[in-house]
Image (cartoon, rainbow, N blue to C red):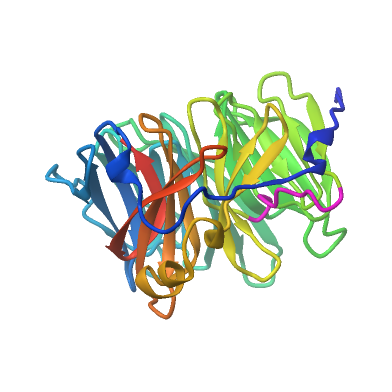
Amino acid sequence: MKTYTFAVGFMLTVLFVACSKTSDESTSENTNFSSSDYGILLQGSTELNSTLLSFDGSELQLSEAQNGFTGIEIPEISYRDKYEYSFYKKTGNCAGEVLVYDFKKNLETSFSVFSDLGMCNLTIGSIAHDDDTVFLSYMIESTGKEKKYFIRFIDKNSGNFVYEDIEIPMPPTQMVASNDRLFVLMVDLGNTEENYVSVIQKSTKETIHEMGLGMDVGTMFVKPDGNIIISYPTLHTTLDSNNLTVAYTQYGEGAQPMFFNSMAISFDASEKMYYTMKTSDGGRIPAVYNFDTSTAVLYYFENFLTTAQLDVEYNVDYTTAVGYDQKNDLILVGYKKKGQENEGGILRISPAPDFSFIDNYDLIGVPLAIFDL
């Protein structure tokens, strides 16, 4: 039985735009900071790699710690769960490889997949993982037959990567794992074009709940409390991962936080969300959303960088990743440089209301994720 709980977030009738007290120069030399370390996932022209940065309280620099992530060819799909990423890449006409890497513990697991099927007409849809399982959705289309959709459950902690496949009725577009369940976002392609979410109990591989979501569904992700956010342009749905009840937060006109199309999402210890927000001119800026108060703070570059810094010194194009330094209460903004496909940087700013620009560090590669280690 489906139970619905409604919650309307009127606080979103106002979006806060942060304005810097000063943007003439960095302020790190005038502020007492603690030492901290960051891991940054970077995209180059053909591969993903990473770098480690260290802050000693006065200067941001390359870390002397060993970097365990040696790199991977740019994968077809990926999934982030806190400090851990899973990647899928095609290794041949009939097979692929999964790599799972924990950027906090520097632990890597990799294994081959799909060589057992004996066919090459596979289409991989999405990937997800939790502590012990990797989930891969895929489609098989046989000659003269209809398309069939499956999810493979792979035990990544077993020595021989035991797996089990289950069939699902519609094409999956996204998957997230929480509370020993897999939440699968599907679309009724070629018919109603509406979206549905299916909840699969991991232990039994059985579907225990389905719900229609309508049209215009954006990003689906897991909050730190384990609940699922299903986003739309004008509202978001919170699906309780335990009792499967739902609550709706409706945005005010002109006050949409616009995280429905963001794939760069992270959280701090208080469960505030840091994400890239698409602006009306097509750019992307850093933003912070507070689910408790239903408010968003937007950080436009021109409000904390001078024109010379923005266009010449740092040559900022758009935001690609946003993180948070818990020790120092700093927002970490990854960005791509203008006219340079494989170069970027990281800006550090203090959050509103005591908003100011701290410093910048140039990077070889474009930041995709920033980890506060």
Work out whether 337 lies above or below 25: below
Residue 272 coordinates in the image, percent (x, y): 57, 33
**Quarter containing the N terminus:** top right
Image location (x, y in percent) of residue 149: 64, 53
Q: Pick whichever, 32 or 173, lies toward us.
A: 32
The image shows residue 60, relative to residue 225, as above or below, that is below
Locate residue 132, reporting x and y percent: 41, 30
247, 177: nearer the viewer? 247
Q: Magenta region's main secondary structure?
A: loop
Per the rendered image, the range of residues in magenta is 253-261
**Can you name the residue that lies furthest to the bottom here?**
339
Quarter of image, res 101: top left
Q: Residue 109, how many percent across, how many down?
A: 29, 42
From the image, which quarter does the C terminus lie in? top left
Residue located farthest toward the top when viewing the structure as drawn:
243
**Which residue is at a point 69% across and 66% down the rendered structure image?**
145
Going by the image, does 6 lie left or right of 256? right
Looking at the image, residue 99 sits to the left or right of residue 69; the answer is right
Magenta stretch holds residue 295: no
- 122 over 356 or under it: above or below: below
Q: Which image quarter: residue 7?
A: top right
Seen at 86% across and 61% down, the residue is 191
